[in-house]
Image: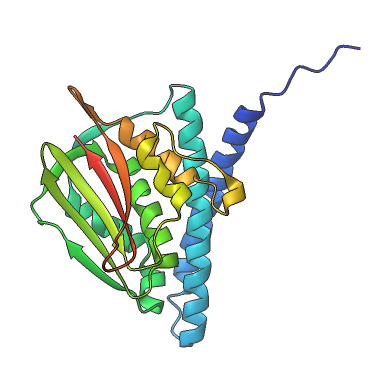
Amino acid sequence: MNKPSELDFSTILATSAHDMKNSLFMLLQSIENLDLADNLTSKQHQAFADLHYQTSRINGGLMQLLALYRDEQNQLPIYIEEHSVAEMFQEVLDRNRLYLNSHHVKILLEVDPDLTAYFDLDLITYLIGDIFINALRHTKKSIILRAFMDNHYLNVQVDDDGEGYPDHMLAINNTTNAPFNASKGRSGLGLLFAQRIAAEHKNKQLQGHILLENKIESGGSLFTLRLP
């Protein structure tokens, strides 16, 4: 009897993640349609919003796994073109509209409506969206989405007033690879994804990177994506 060929488990996971992403996308659309019903109570709207939020988190995690796999295989397509940063922010907000409509979180936009920059729109929207979703979990009252040019870099920031980053996550500022430690309560997958995607954005000698900070005076965390 011939021995079965060895399974390429990483490829199986990537294929499964792709299939699950498609199903979750359809589920998200169904939740959005159900929330449009006229006879829902405020409590039911909030329940749909929370379900949509958690489904979005799962969908984002699968997207990150798939992108990281493709990056390891040198098969991750990067399409860097000129885009509006304000429109990218608006897309992030639109994807989380159900949650924002049902929870009292103040969102502030600090970006010049005419600001444009060169980046992969899909990947950066997912990246900032993931950071924004996590900020929604931990913030107390408000989140600021901010963008500006500084010293040849586009700086994109997600600024919240939560409890701040734990020390083991702040260590990313001193490493070339994001920490990945599920025993700490957070896997670090989102940071690993953010770091890899940022690094794929290059311009001559400049390379994209991320920075994490805790705001000492006002409290909360500040995530910065810097793209050349």
16 to the left or right of 78? right
- Residue drawn at point x = 44 percent, y = 28 percent: 71
Q: Is residue 215 visible?
A: yes
Query: Where's residue 51, x and y in %?
Result: 53, 68
Q: Is residue 49 above or below residue 88?
A: below
Asked if residue 144 is positioned above or below residue 190 in the image, the reply reads: below
The single residue placed furthest to the top in the displayed view is: 2
**The C terminus lies in quadrant:** top left
Q: Which residue is painted at 47% across and 42% down in the image?
A: 64
**Can the viewer see residue 40 in this picture?**
no
Q: Position of residue 100 (x, y in %)?
A: 36, 72
Q: Is residue 38 left or right of residue 201?
A: right
Residue at coordinates 25% horizontally, 56% vertically from top-left?
89
Which residue is nearer to you in this view: 32 or 129?
Answer: 129
Quadrant of the rendered image containing residue 93: bottom left
Locate the N terminus and report the quarter of the image it occupies: top right
Q: Horizontal and vertical percent for residue 148?
A: 13, 50
Instruction: Identify the residue at the far right of this view.
Output: 1
Residue 132: percent from the left, percent from the top?
36, 58
